[in-house]
Image (cartoon, rainbow, N blue to C red):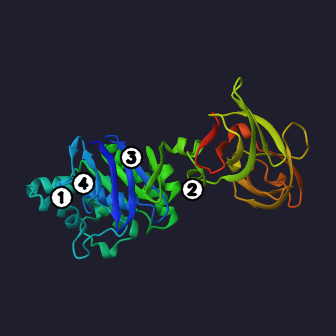
Amino acid sequence: MQSIVFDHVTKYFGTNKAVNDAHFTIEAGEFFTLLGPSGCGKTTLLRTIAGFYRQEEGSIFFGGKKMDDVPTHQRNIGMVFQNYAIFPHMTVFENVAYGLKARSVAKQDIEKRVMEALEMVELSHLKDRVPSDMSGGQQQRIALARAVVIRPGLLLMDEPLSNLDAKLRVKMRSDIRRLQKELNITTIYVTHDQEEALAVSDRIAVMSEGRVQQIASPEDIYAYPANRFVANFIGTSNFLTGSCGAYRKDTGEAEIRLSGAAFKLPLAKAYEGGVLFAIRPERIRLQTEPSGEGLIPGVVETVTFLGEKVSYLVRLDDGSLLDVQEHAVQPHHLRQEKQRVFVNLQPGKTTMFDESGKEVLYRAAF
């Protein structure tokens, strides 16, 4: 178990910065996820950690040791990849034992450690099978056992569940999280799947165009996005533009106008001009009567029943569309299409950015 430090790491491909000034620390024993869309730099950063790539700028440290010139095979890392990379002609036992044999571990120790690893991934009863006779989920468990049997100081996982069906992915991510906590291995996990990242991570680094946009716990990433990109990529957000009036130094507040509603919010800094709101669908409240302040009239365009919740698409009178979610406590009392409603955006439970969407002006305190 060891900490990982990125000291202003930049990796180029030609003139393109695939990783742009990565500067952060992963704590020992942490399950840390690199999350972002294809081409954002997450896999490049992972491969740089592994030593497959050499960064052009900055340094990487494992537990205080500078790793820039240390070859991959000397970095004491376990790796699990999207394509499993297991040997089809070897049995399950032989696949898991391969890394130990390469390290010249004693035969009796190999037997003991391989069986321990297979028990962890619930495959000990299949040790004599060959991978070609096994399911994708079982093959991924072989790859996981092979990675942890060598007792690495660091476990790297690159989209390990992307080839599995949805139900199996949910089961496997729980198993991976459980195993990581049991072994207390520092783990860096790459995925483009936001739900997967939220489910398994201690912290998440959201990446875009080679740069880390925000690092925080899953809860904070969702509730307190650092910019428009994060708010849009993590979960679902409604984006509405408004205006911010004169800032009052005595109260720290400014009057905000948004889709015909007016209200006051405390700002993080003096600001006047256009603003952008990121509003989660479950934060919005719908009413059938115009009772209260700051309500915005609209019409329900579509109703989608999703079991425990209902998703409504509401068009405001100014033409804006809102995704609104409510718990389906009484399914027979659903709102109807073309129904007139009054929308309470609950601005105090939103995030407000400047016009560019890059700087937070107001963040709800939950």
- Is 249 or 182 nearer to us in this picture? 249
Q: Which mark is residue 233?
A: 2
Q: Which corner quadrant of the image does residue 302 belong to? A: bottom right
The residue wearing badge 3 is: 31
Classify mark 4: residues with Cα within 10 Å, few (<14), some (14-19) or many (20+): many
The residue at 39%/62% (across/down) is: 18
Label 2 element class: helix
User: x%, y% of residue 62?
Assistant: 25, 45
Image quarter of the N terminus: top left
Classify mark 2: residues with Cα within 10 Å, few (<14), some (14-19) or many (20+): many
Q: Are marks 3 and 2 in contact (CB under 8 Å)?
A: no
Q: Which mark is residue 77?
A: 4
The residue at 46%/57% (across/down) is: 171
Q: Identify residue type, mark 3.
A: Phe
**Measured Cα–Cα span from mark 3 to mark 1:** 24 Å
Label 1 element class: loop
The residue at 69%/28% (across/down) is: 252
User: x%, y% of residue 137?
Assistant: 40, 65
Q: Identify residue type, mark 4.
A: Ile
Q: Which mark is residue 71?
A: 1
